[in-house]
Image: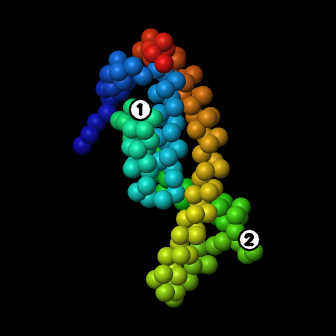
Amino acid sequence: MLRISPSSIKLNAASWLRKGISPRRLALTLALGFAIGCIPVVGVPTVLCAALALALRLNLPAIQAANYAAMPLQLLLIVPFVRMGGWLFQPGPRLAFAAVPLHLSPLAFASQIGGITGYALLAWMLVAGPAILLMTLTLTGVLRRIPVFAEAENGD
């Protein structure tokens, strides 16, 4: 069983800072990882976080740690994102899970599920932008108060 102690977290944070990451950049990395970790499609966030970290030269272990921390929330938010997306974007009758009949052909069933997933992703996009901004600002303020992070303030 993996045990994480406060001293090991401090050592990992210090090693991230020695690699040139500032509190602001680490806050952005963690906010992106957490927000992407809440995407209402299981399996997608890990690959997306890795690609984003490589493309933007963010800290890969930090973004994946935030992604994995968000996994329980991801599962809890699938239904609210589906309902929000259906409420916002579906014309006509409101979307419900009962609206996907199981007697459909496999292609029609996949089409229905794809539509529901699309609505959930659109709802996530509306929520994710402001959430990333709010988390980045909050985490930056918190990280700047930690002495080991305050020393790296000029690294960005």
Neighbourhood count class around disc 2 (C-alpha, 10 Å): few under 14, some 14–19, many 20 upward: few
Q: Quick check: 121 above or below 36?
A: below
- Give the position of the N terminus as an image quadrant: top left
Observer-side mark, 2 or 1, equals 1
Residue 86 on image: x %, y %:
66, 66
Q: Quick check: 102 above or below 94?
A: below
Q: Going by the image, does 137 lie left or right of 57? A: right
Taking the image as drawn, is residue 48 in sight?
yes
Neighbourhood count class around disc 1 (C-alpha, 10 Å): few under 14, some 14–19, many 20 upward: few
> Residue reaching furthest right?
92
Q: Coloured how?
A: rainbow
Callout 1: SS: loop
Residue 63 on image: x %, y %:
42, 38
Q: Which mark is residue 95?
A: none
Callout 2: SS: loop
> Residue reaching furthest left?
1
* Residue to which mark 2 is pinned: 91
Q: Quick check: 74 above or below 111?
A: above
Residue at 58%, 70% (x, y): give it. 115
Q: Going by the image, does 41 lie left or right of 85? A: left
Residue 66 on image: x %, y %:
44, 39
* Residue to which mark 1 is pinned: 57
Cα separation between marks 2 and 1 = 41 Å
Residue at 73%, 71% (x, y): give it. 91
Taking the image as drawn, is residue 69 in sight?
no
Residue at 65%, 61% (x, y): give it. 85
Residue type, mark 1 in image: Arg
Residue type, mark 2 in image: Pro
* Circle nearer the N terminus (2, 1): 1
Residue 13 on image: x %, y %:
37, 24
